[in-house]
Amino acid sequence: MSGLLSLGQSSSESCALLFFGIGRKFKEKVYPSIMWNLLRPNPECDVFVHTYNVTKVMGKRGGEDGTGSVNASDISLLQKNRSAIMFESDKSFRHKRNVNYYRTLFPRPSRWDYPSSIDNMVRQWHSIEMVWAIMETHEMSVQARYTDVGLFRLDVVFTHPIIIDGADEVAVIPPLMYEATRSKTAWGGYNDRLFYGKREYAKPWATERFNSVPSYLHWQKTNKHYDQRRGLHSEDFLRWLLVFHFPTPLKTKPLCFHRIRSTGMVMNDCHLIAARFKFNEAKYGNKHTEARGVALIASSVQHPTKISDLVDFPPRRRYRQDGKEASGVRHRRDGKEASGMRGKVRQESAQV
């Protein structure tokens, strides 16, 4: 059963925050970070949400072990005077999307689990497209049009404020949160977990995925770089969509946020960002701790007005191709010790 909660009058400002997906430990961990880092920095933005009325997540991958639960009603915390929230059943989703067809496009080779990984990708794409449709329905009802739009997952802890201001940032995405190896069989691409900027660039990101799949598959067949890869891979598809199909002036910004599993486990998603970028949250008044290879950033996981709890993770170990743990010394391809700059050769297992 699907349901749409209250839809109040639109704000005089032309900003919208769109949330999609399944909320995991939403009340306990996700909502406080959204309150502090998205709602408060953007007080004039209207809020639109699409989520699924489920009690369990699908699949046992990426920290999910089947023991966690989902309380969809917690998403109602996002309801305010200017908001619309839709709860959709999994039955309704499957009626609208031919999941079996997309299973035939399972990417190969990949570390995904069949069929749950491809099902969850389609489920996320559907949620993104639906929340955009909810926003457009509201626009028609009030004869208004949002110019700045942000799209965010419901199952991540945001670690610092994000301000939706299209004046200088017209199309912003986070960096890829795993390091893809340079191999003909390795997938890479663009991070598909967040986007904000001008509406004209947000719309293809949100609404042109399903429509563009045939063109993407045809492009694969005519591209020699895909002779050992086939199928529908989310991050690679998004790179194609925003670079070749709908050229977008993208800006990659070091936005750190951690995925939450239904068990309450917090994923270490920012270790590569911390290594590549220098975080500076002093201007927000946030506590900030630097560590080797790990982002220990103050996170509002307990209370929306107090950022005092650190999402802390053990250092991530690195291994050589022969399986032995790597030393702390980096070497160049010629075997000589590398300088203090980041080594050009870096092999690490991808974590999708």
Image (cartoon, rainbow, N blue to C red):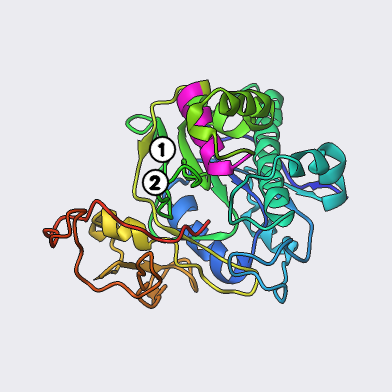
Identity, as a three-letter code, of the amino acid under mark 2: Arg
Q: Residue at x 17, y 59 (%)?
A: 335
Q: Is residue 82 above or below residue 204?
A: below
Which sits in the foreground, 135 or 228?
Answer: 228
- Is residue 344 visible in the rendered image? The answer is yes
On screen, residue 208 versus residue 349, left or right, reads right
SS type, badge 2? loop
Q: CA distance from mark 1 to mark 2?
A: 25 Å
On the image, the x and y values in percent for residue 22 come to 67, 56
Q: Which residues are magenta?
A: 232-244
Q: Is residue 270 above or below residue 1?
A: below
SS type, badge 1? strand
Magenta segment's dominant SS is: helix
Q: Are marks 1 and 2 in contact (CB under 8 Å)?
A: no
On the image, the x and y values in percent for residue 103 come to 75, 44
Which sits in the foreground, 144 or 95?
Answer: 95
Q: Residue at x 55, y 39 (%)?
A: 228
Residue position for label 1: 172
